[in-house]
Amino acid sequence: MAAAPFDINDIKRRMQGATAALRHELGGLRTGRASASMLEPVQVEAYGSHMPLNQVATVSVPEPRLLSVQVWDKSMVKAVEKAIVDSNLGLSPATEGQVLRLRIPELNEERRKDLVKVAHKYAEAAKVAVRHVRRDGLDVLKKAEKAHEISEDDHERQAGEVQKATDATIGEIDQLLAAKEKEILTV
């Protein structure tokens, strides 16, 4: 009997990829609290090309509602300031020498509800990705059973493992969403 090309660890790894992507997307949602990851999408016109902000400055969070951007090269301060303003993040830098301070404004109730909807959309997309991985895994098992590479009992047992992994990952996604929702709605 040939070994089936089925690997539960590969399926779990692919499911974890969906939760990692969700974590990244949720991290970028602005909640009224300062987070260095808020500035990840900012591209600075530097030395004749576009560079990520973190390649020309250090971003830190000295207070819960304040970001500090320490620009390494004095000649880049204006370019960094312009990049932050042009990024549509709604942040206005206050410049002091080579340090830009960014106050994070309070969120109103309507904006909070919009952010929760966006978080739900991200979580649903992650769940769909996990279900696709489950379907792929079950298809491999079905084909292996049809080709008589595994027995019906092995198919059932491994399908159960796939479902267990799916349920655990969906549960993790729900926990991430609940935590982000709480963070958005309470300040």
Image: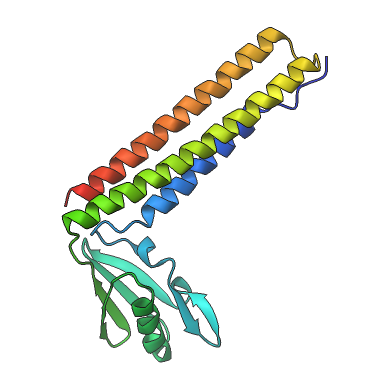
User: Residue, x 80% and y 13% (percent of image)?
Assistant: 148
In the picture shown, does residue 125 fall above or below 3? below
Q: Position of residue 129 (x, y in %)?
A: 53, 39
Residue 37 relative to residue 92: left or right? right
Picture residue at 67% right of the left edge, 8% below the top: 153
**Residue at the limit of the structure toward the top, as seen here:** 153
Q: Residue at x 36, y 70 (%)?
A: 59
How many marks can you see? 0
Say whether residue 143 is left or right of residue 64: right
Dividing the picture into quadrants, the one containing residue 66 is bottom left
- Quick check: can you spot residue 9? no
Q: Residue furthest right?
A: 1
The answer to whether 98 is drawn above or below residue 171 in the figure is: below
The quarter of the picture where the N terminus appears is top right
Relative to the observer, which residue lies in front, 146 or 17? 146
Q: As displayed, is residue 115 above or below residue 70?
A: above
Q: Is residue 64 visible?
A: yes
Front-most of residues 42 and 138: 138
The answer to which of 49 and 71 lies nearer the viewer is 49
Give the percent coordinates (x, y) of residue 97. 29, 88
Q: How is the image coloured?
A: rainbow
Residue 109 in picture, x, y percent from top left: 17, 54
Rendered position, 97 above or below 138: below
